Amino acid sequence: MKLSIASKVLLACLSVAATACSPSSPDATGVATATDTGEAAAPPARIVPLPASVETRPGELAIAKAVAVELPADAPMATRALEELLDTLALARDGAAPVRVRLALEDDAALGEEGYRLEVGEGVALVARTDIGLLHAVQSLRQLLPPTAQPEYRLPHLSIADAPAYPWRGLSLDVARSFMPVEYLEKHIDRMAMFKMNRLHLHLSDDQGWRMEIKRYPKLVEIGGASAVKGGRSGWYTQEQLEHLVAYAQARGITIVPEIDMPGHVQAMLASYNELACDDEDNLSTYDGLEVGFSVLCLSKPDVVYPFVRNVLEEVLAVFPSQQIHIGGDEIKDPLYGEFVGRAAAMVKEMGRTPIVWEEGSVADTSPDMLLQLWNDGYDIAPAVAEGHPLILSPCTYFYLDHGNYAGQPQTYDWCRKEGVPIARTYSFDPSKFETAVGVEAALWTELVHDDAAADNRLWPRLAAVSEVAWTPMAQRDYAGFVQRMGALRPHLDAQGIAYHPEPDLGWE
Ligand code: ACM
């Protein structure tokens, strides 16, 4: 499915102020947009991530007050999203309304697992093979419409056929250095869903904090949960809260992937259960600094460490149904490191799940289905690719969103890239260079991100660029088009209350 040049030009036209494509004035594309539905201009086709194919036709569909809705019986995610959209836009459901919105599941193999078609003509038709495909169609429809209730809506007649390039479109949130409240995570899940992202990786443990209730080891949250990076937020999630979040995310097409970082980045664990440290270790208090790489589980005490790891993982897996489970593995030097990663990964597999380890885990002897998460651009990942390990791509010069939106942004890191990670750079990443890539994942580390507003500022609008890198093949992407479409979506971000970075590239200064 290729986007034709004419469609690209038209999309650009539709992305700018609506009057540029007004029904009464022929637009720069030469495509007639005449309509008999009145004065108002067509809304912009401002879809991010860019769909595989968009064809617009002359004419508009006007919608006011109510629509007739046809829903399949077994598409709960899409149904929920459509109902929320209609409520937001104050559109009633009325079987006698002149415009019909039809959602249908069709067993058409060409649609793939997540693909969909969206047609606007006399009515609106959304077709997919799966509930998740239909959910994506609803998100596209949502972006074509304004974010708040209006007296009338106008949609250009169009046909969209769409499917993602990669199945893994993620974000990792470090809730360990600085805690993030459940309410923020819920809001964040809604925002990710709008951009068709589908993996929320929660970094639940690190030196500065432990965030998940483990019933067998209550001191993990009593001690580790009370700690945080200096200036950051402490706190922890009950298992009930996490189960709620898992269900909340699932209903929005997002899988929460838990990470327990081991065998390094464990000071909060050691401070909670001193026996996990080697007997000569005298640094057993909680930690609120910025160093990394100093704490390690005592791997020469396997009878203490491995039962602990197994018991913790059992509770983690009972709460998180994600097929993939992250066991960390970054930034630690220990003679028994490879053995640890091999044993912990094997445990996850025995429990019926698939382990993920940061890139360093590639040195361990593991089953080739273990995913590796690349985070240093220059790391030699080729041998692991040759072994067949699937890759989650998070190279820090593109995807570490704790780095500045611009060089020198206050309260941001620059250890990975002095110039920061501007949105244009994030957008320019080409995952296709990595043969076994399953997708991309941005990361927000929180040593310097201590509240919701700072998190919003670092995440948006860059996360929308991440969504397009993961969804749309490199050959179809172009930054100028993204800038226009994303620029036009600003009211949607405003309506969600996002305290985004006022990105000059998008005209948001
Ligand atoms: C990492 O940034 N240490 C994965």
Image (tube, rainbow, N blue to C red):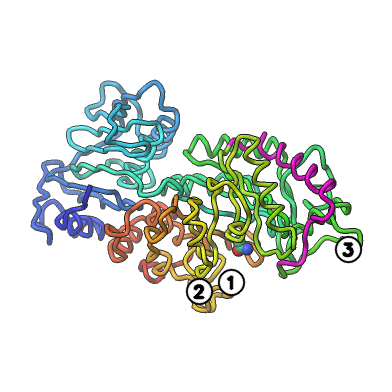
Residue at the disc numbered 3: 281
Dot 2 or dot 1: first in sequence order is 1
Which of the 4 image quarters holds residue 504? Answer: bottom left
Establish if 70 lies above or below 373: above
| Quarter the C terminus occupies | bottom left
Give the residue drawn at x 69%, y 35%: 240
Give the x, y percent position of residue 141: 32, 41
Query: In the picture provided, is 216 more to the left or to the right than 16?
Result: right
Task: Choose between 4 and 276: the one closer to the eye.
Answer: 276
Between the residue at mark 2 and the residue at mark 1, the CA separation in whole angstroms equals: 8 Å
Q: Is residue 372 visible?
A: yes
Determine whether label 2 and label 1 are within 8 Å by CB: yes
Task: Choose between 98 and 256: the one closer to the eye.
Answer: 256
* Amino acid at dot 3: Glu
Query: In the picture provided, is 448 more to the left or to the right than 122?
Result: right
Ligand 1 quadrant assignment: bottom right
Q: Which residues are magenta?
A: 293-321
- Residue 420, disc: 2
Give the x, y percent position of residue 483: 33, 64
* Amino acid at dot 2: Gly
Is residue 311 on the magenta stretch?
Answer: yes
Task: Choose between 164 and 239: the one closer to the eye.
Answer: 164
- Residue 412, disc: 1
Q: Secondary structure at mark 2?
A: loop
Q: Is the stretch drawn in magenta largely helix, strand or loop?
A: helix
Between the residue at mark 3 and the residue at mark 1, the CA separation in whole angstroms equals: 32 Å
Disc 2 residue lies near ligand 1 with CB under 8 A? no
Query: In the picture provided, is 260 more to the left or to the right than 18?
Result: right
Establish if 289 lies above or below 431: below
